[in-house]
Image (cartoon, rainbow, N blue to C red):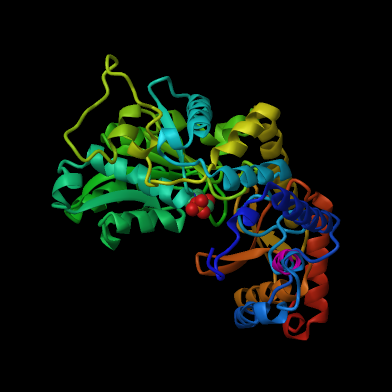
Amino acid sequence: MSTNSFDFEQLYSAKGFHEDGTLLLSELTAYLQQATDLKAPALSYVEPDEMLRYWQSWNEENQHLSDSERIKKFCTDLLSNTNHLQNPKYVGHQVSAPLPIASLMMLIGGTSNNGSAVYEMGMAPTAMERIVTDLLCSKFGWDHHSRGFLTSGGTLANLTALLAARKFKATEDIWNQGMQKPLAILVSSQAHYCVDRAARIMGLGADGIISIAVNENFCTEENAIETAYQSALAKGREVIAVVGSAPSTSTGNYDNLEALGKFAKDKDLWFHIDAAHGGPAIFSKKYKHLLKGSEWADSIIVDGHKMMLMPALSTAVLFKNKNHAYENFNQSAAYLLEDSIEEDWYNGAKKTFECTKTMMVLPWFLLLNLYGETLFESYIDRQYDLARAFAEAINHSEDFETAARVDSNIVCFRYRFKENIDDQNKQLRAYLLKNSNYYLVQTRLNGSHYLRVSLMNPLTKLDHLRQLLDEIRKVVKTQKHLSNLSL
Ligand SMILES: *Cc1c(COP(=O)(O)O)cnc(C)c1O
């Protein structure tokens, strides 16, 4: 053995794994405890350049420590410089506070590394993926001709579905011949920006993304669909798809999926639903009506790491017609599956973007088996109810107002400053980012500035949200630059 080579036997030793694992687990336990006990702010904000310098000098600062001390220090330093999603005062972006058992599944995935799209490189997860996506398809009201799979995030999932739309609705064979004729999709101006990105990646260009006008609640206006369609035709575009948001990103409002679906059917267009955030409402008796019309869809996507309590990153892409899943990336001549042809459902590589995937299915399968669908039903009901209660508290106050109707667990609101309302709310958010124990975000709607919360954490209570309003009132009172112009 050469002197500078590593002792791989030792690096792979099961004993070492146990020692490091124990250490890591106790660090993560302390982190979780601190987050759920509200012992620290959800986010202790550090400016990007300062953060960069911190990690640039990290090695030098900690060189005197032993390996295990460094692993420990690494965990502590890392976790104290992250956003603590398990803290009930985390009300920021639409990423789940993962259930601890779901997080632990990633440890198995990271250890066995059997997440490939090749069956032999991931037998168990391949079978599980079929089971959970079959369940989702049936929840959306589709029959056994439907199929799905998991892919790495909503962005890639939307692109996958829109590529299928292009393959099956465009008159030209673009997959083989390249783009000949300009195409278009119809989508709400409030859709997630990744739909726009997917369309541009597909070569549609800015003019290929035709906006459907929205109403006062930021949902697609029913009679604006035809207008959008006609404007695409007038531009010489061939329309391939209609995309519905379930819900839209900024305000969390569900499009009228039934109207979009019927329009698509009428015009023989592909109907895609981006249900990355709000798809799991299908598990709720109380809220599944928001997804009415999903039975009309050709494709639907649902994120596991948004409203299904799982760690990032995994998204279900569902196709009503399984041929669409198999044909999407098929390079050779069409081979539509006949009932007589044996379906190689286990051959994931034919359907997904990825060649190698993570074992993203583990939390889906385990959560559904441990707790059943009612886990997701009670989570959705709790969060959607909470958002409605918060919106009510806001609108009952004199000094705050909401931006729109609340459909999901997202609420946009603002302080009713008498003057410079947009600028003041913007400054307010900047102040809260650095000085508050809460983490919330912001958005612009019709040119106006709003604070925005996504109630992702099932430990967040209405009291926490009332306290947030009180804290904002206090800031407005005490911060001169804000209070000068207040009510
Ligand atoms: C989050 C989100 C996406 C993007 O999904 P990622 O998993 O973050 O890539 C797309 N559409 C909607 C409606 C979303 O909420």
Query: Is residue 74 covered in magenta?
Result: yes
Where in the figure is residue 42, as x and y percent of width and height?
75, 63
In this figure, what is the number of numbered marks? 0
| The magenta segment | 71-79
Would you place residue 290 above or below residue 459 in this image? above
Question: Relative to 169, is 93 on the left or the right?
Answer: right
Measured as percent of width and height from the top left, residue 117 is found at 41, 39
Seen from this angle, which residue lies furthest front? 1
For image coordinates 36% across by 42% down, the residue present is 161
Q: Locate the N terminus and report the quarter of the image it occupies.
A: bottom right
Left of 208 or right of it: where is 141?
A: right
Snapshot quadrant of residue 400? bottom right
Q: Residue at x 71, y 34 (%)?
A: 378
Is residue 408 at least partly visible in the picture?
no
- Does the magenta stretch mainly form a helix, a strand or a loop? helix
Question: Which is more toward the observer, 473 or 285?
Answer: 285
Residue at the image point whose x is 40% and y is 47% from the top: 354
Q: Is 275 left, or right, of 167 in this rendering?
A: right
The one of 255 and 203 positioned closer to us in this rendering: 203
Instruction: Specify whether residue 393 is painted magenta.
Output: no
Q: Nearer the viewer, residue 466 or 398?
A: 466
Q: Is residue 106 visible?
A: yes
Q: Is residue 433 left or right of residue 324?
A: right
Instruction: Please tell me in which quadrant of the rendered image residue 210 appears.
Output: bottom left
Up/down of 184 relative to 377, above or below = below
Q: Is residue 449 above or below residue 244?
A: below
Quadrant of the snapshot with the C terminus: bottom right
Residue 476: name its quadrant. Answer: bottom right
Residue 203 percent across, percent down from the top left: 25, 57
Residue 413 drawn at (x, y percent): 66, 61
170 vs 94: above or below: above
Residue plotted at (33% across, 45% down): 162
